[in-house]
Image (cartoon, coloured by chain):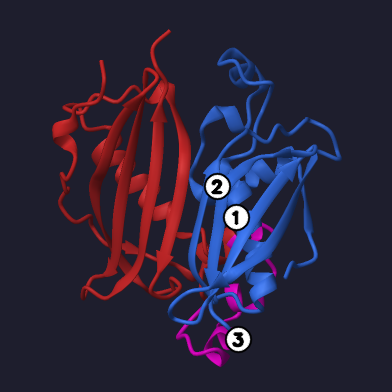
Chain colours: A blue, B red
Amino acid sequence: MSFESQTFRVTRADLVRYAGASGDFNPIHWSERFATGVGLPGVIAHGMFTMALVGRAVTAWAGAPDAVVEFGVRFARPVPVPDTDEGTEVVVTATVKGETEDGNTKLALTATCQGEKVLSLAQAVVRKR
Amino acid sequence: MPLDQSFVGRTYPPTEPYLVGREKIREFARAIGATDREYVDPEAARAIGYQDVVAPPTFPIIITMASSHAQIVEDPELGIDYSRVVHGDQKFAYARPIVAGDALVCVNTVEEITTRGGHDFMTTRSDVTTEAGEPVVTVWAKLVQRGEE
């Protein structure tokens, strides 16, 4: 079983707001000069911001904000965020991969940006409603 | 120089409690664009069995990243060069969601250090509990220290 994919728009303003709320002020997430200076294509999203968007998708699919039992990802590729009004988009999908011994549901997750997978080994365990 | 394997299994002293504020949860929920009422409205959170607003699943990173950074990444004996570090993996296992009003203590441990292809990989585990010792969430982060050019 799969869920309908969820799409999240990501702009530079989102990264600035996330930096402030999370306390992660690494300049690769807000300074083009710094990001290109360390060999990145430009400013990239915080991995934890991408993971937070995937978390929004997971809680929406699970139907409750407290339904997540386990949640893990590997950051496979950066999410470049251009300095435009549109920014970029992250698309999240999930497939049910079975049940745990406790009767919870295992989800295999994907997150893509510009058609490329930005996470690997992404999975969650959610409680049945 | 590869990271010192003898740090594997090292556990640091419990951190000072982090007091989880209702406004901090609201601010974090806004920043990730989450609109669930239980993140902002104490009444909505009480309706699903919590004393105050609950935090989104990745909220614990605020607490664990700061404390593991201060204790492990900045441990001069370990000697990590943070300018070469990228975030590899992240995992959370929840006993329950974080709730506004929690006073949370982190116990940080170096769980694994490996070296592959000139890069160092370090997994840290943060056991997050209430001051009374009630388990709340366990958080693993794998950091990659890229090899020197």
> Dot 2: what SS?
helix
> What is the x, y in percent for residue B72?
25, 38
Give the vertical position of B99 relative to B122 (above or below). Answer: below
Instruction: Say which of B115 and A63 sits in front.
Output: B115
Q: Nearer the viewer, mark 1 or mark 3?
A: 3
Q: How many marks?
A: 3
Where is residue B63 shown, x and y percent of the image? Answer: 38, 54
Label 2 Cα neighbours within 10 Å, binned few <14 / some 14-19 / many ≥20: many
Relative to A129, residue B10 above or below: above
- The magenta span reads B29-53
* Residues at circles 1 and 3 in contact by the CB criterion of under 8 Å: no
Pointer 2 indicates a residue of which chain? A
Q: Residue B70 location in percent, x, y?
A: 29, 40
Q: Residue at 30% of width from left, 51% of height from top? A: B125
Q: To which residue does mark 1 refer?
A: A52
The crowding category of the residue bearing disc 1, from other C-alpha atoms within 10 Å (few below 14, some 14 to 19, many at least 20), is many
Q: Nearer the viewer, residue B51 or B136?
A: B136
Instruction: Specify the quadrant that holds the N terminus of chain A.
Output: bottom right
Residue A119 is a magenta residue: no
Please name the residue that numbered disc 2 is placed on. Answer: A48
Task: Work out how far the residue at label 2 is from the one at label 1, CA to CA, in angstroms.
Answer: 6 Å
Tell me, yes or no, whether dots 2 and 3 are on the same chain. yes
Vertical comparison of B94 with B5: above or below = below
Residue in the image at 55% along x and 76% along y: A67
Question: Considering the numbered disc 1 on the image, is that residue within a helix, a strand or a loop?
Answer: helix
Location of the C terminus of chain A by quadrant is: bottom right
